[in-house]
Image (tube, rainbow, N blue to C red):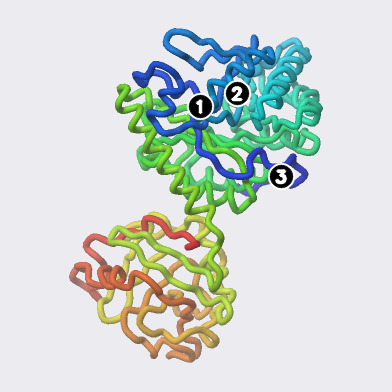
Amino acid sequence: MVAAWVLGAGLLAPASAEWKVGVRDAYLANLDADSVWSAAKKVGIPVLEVVVTSDLSCDRLYEGKEKPYRVDTPENREKLLEAVRKNDCELVAFCALVPLPKDGNEDWAVEWISKVAKAAAAMKVPVVYMPLGGRDLPQEQFVERATAFIKKVGPVARASKVQLAIENLGPYLNKPEVLAPLLMASKGGEVALAFDPANMYWFGYPRDRIYDLVKIFAPYVRYLHVKNAKYPPDKRDSQREMGWEYGKYAVPVREGDLDWERILGILFDAGFKGDIVIEDDSLQKFDAAGKQKALQEDATYLKETVAKKSKPARSGPPRVEFETSLGSFTVELCPEKTPETVKNFLRYVDDGYYDGTVFHRVIPNFMIQGGGFTSATEQKFKGLHEPVRNEAKQGLSNKRGTIAMARTPDPHSATSQFFVNVVDNAFLDAPGQDGWGYCAFGTVVGGMDVVDKIRNVPTQPGGEKSTPVNPPVILKARRAK
């Protein structure tokens, strides 16, 4: 589905100048810790998102059996800040749940958020995100109430210089046709998006649709929640009923269906600068030790991913790394010779099209071919783009280690499939046997030993004996930085 909305610039300054990995305070409960601060130290996540209730108490911040913190007065705010400093922690957001009123009077909610934003400004907490309650309202009434609230609360952001944000959650705000107009109702981006892609996965969208939605809403994201789920393959790739078996299939962040490296890459490319906060809903499955281990691994994975994605882009020609079931290899592309072919290939890479495809044709004294099948016999058609013009006459020679486009007898029929030459195949160069040849557009610059492992996998008897018994899988193909 192609987005019908254009979400763009005009937002407040980034909520954060860097990407910190944090955790919501409620997820630090039941860790056999005597306080929320010691729990944060146990899991190695000193960056906290704090829930603030309607009476301005912080009822998820515990010390023993006490919940001693509030943000309603300067003295109470300083008491909390002193505990934060003493325990080497940091507050990155306040969470304030706003139940939308049925009677249409949002003034009480605006007054409350004004108080939360005032406290956030005084304590240098950059974000107040506001989950909007009201799932008992009909959708039309919910949208009406939410729009009115967003318009009224906008001046609060301007006055406090705190980024306000709504979150996509529940039966309405995970619908793009509802969420997008609400975001556009905010003048100058005073109310932006606290984004939770996994909430959209919970809502029932197929996995591939999630990445499209991330691209649509990336310009409005100022804060990010992270969790994951791992559904059976037939449910992962199809529309599901809202909330279907989510608790059963919730897993730690690294283990789930959603590729957070890909999601963060999309957000970073769109200019996202904000904090990344863990909401791991799989914790309910574990004892205290298991919860601690899951949160530690979540944080390690996200910090590693942020470090990888936030590195300055490598100068020089574009490179693509293929992570396969037999190891990884990297190709460097040649856009100066084959611009249209490289553009076409990178389009499939950026779409994530190659993830889960296989090398379905392997000939040890010729080449290995992939990028178009999900098994030895099942071709992938969903996501194909129009064929690309054959640039073999200006491309590289088909020498060992070069990557080239596969095609039918029609010289201009190449789409997603490619092959890597494992020997010199000069006879494929233009003009070839049909006056055109096969377009080589890059070279393997790392991992040729993995390519050789793929060329030597056992193949089935019959025909040209090129079908692997167990086709090597492309787990992931990404631009290398």
Q: Nearer the viewer, residue 420 or 3?
A: 420
Check contact, mark 1 vs mark 2: CB within 8 A.
Answer: yes
Q: Position of residue 30 (x, y in %)?
A: 38, 18
Secondary-structure class at tag 2: strand
Read off the residue under disc 3. 7
Mark pair 3, 2: CA separation = 24 Å
Q: Nearer the viewer, residue 208 or 287?
A: 287
**Residue drawn at x 48%, y 31% as measured from the top left:** 46
Tell me which label, 1 or 2, sits earlier in the chain.
Answer: 1
Check contact, mark 1 vs mark 3: CB within 8 A.
Answer: no
Q: Nearer the viewer, mark 1 or mark 3?
A: 1
Q: Quadrant of residue 19?
A: top right
Q: Is residue 190 above or below residue 372?
A: above
Secondary-structure class at tag 1: strand
Q: Is residue 345 visible?
A: yes
Mark pair 1, 2: CA separation = 9 Å
Q: Position of residue 227 (x, y in %)?
A: 46, 34
Q: Nearer the viewer, residue 84 or 141?
A: 84
What's under tag 3, amino acid-wise?
A: Leu
What's under tag 1, amino acid-wise?
A: Arg
Q: Nearer the viewer, mark 3 or mark 2?
A: 2
**Residue drawn at x 71%, y 19% as measured from the top left:** 113
Q: Which label was assigned to residue 280?
A: none
Task: Say whether residue 132 is left or right of residue 478.
Answer: right
Q: Which label was assigned to residue 24?
A: 1
Q: Is residue 62 above or below residue 277?
A: above
Q: Position of residue 185 (x, y in %)?
A: 77, 33
Q: Quadrant of residue 75?
A: top right
Neighbours of disc 1 within 10 Å: few (<14), some (14-19), many (20+) = many
Q: Is residue 287 above or below residue 57?
A: below
Read off the residue under disc 2. 95
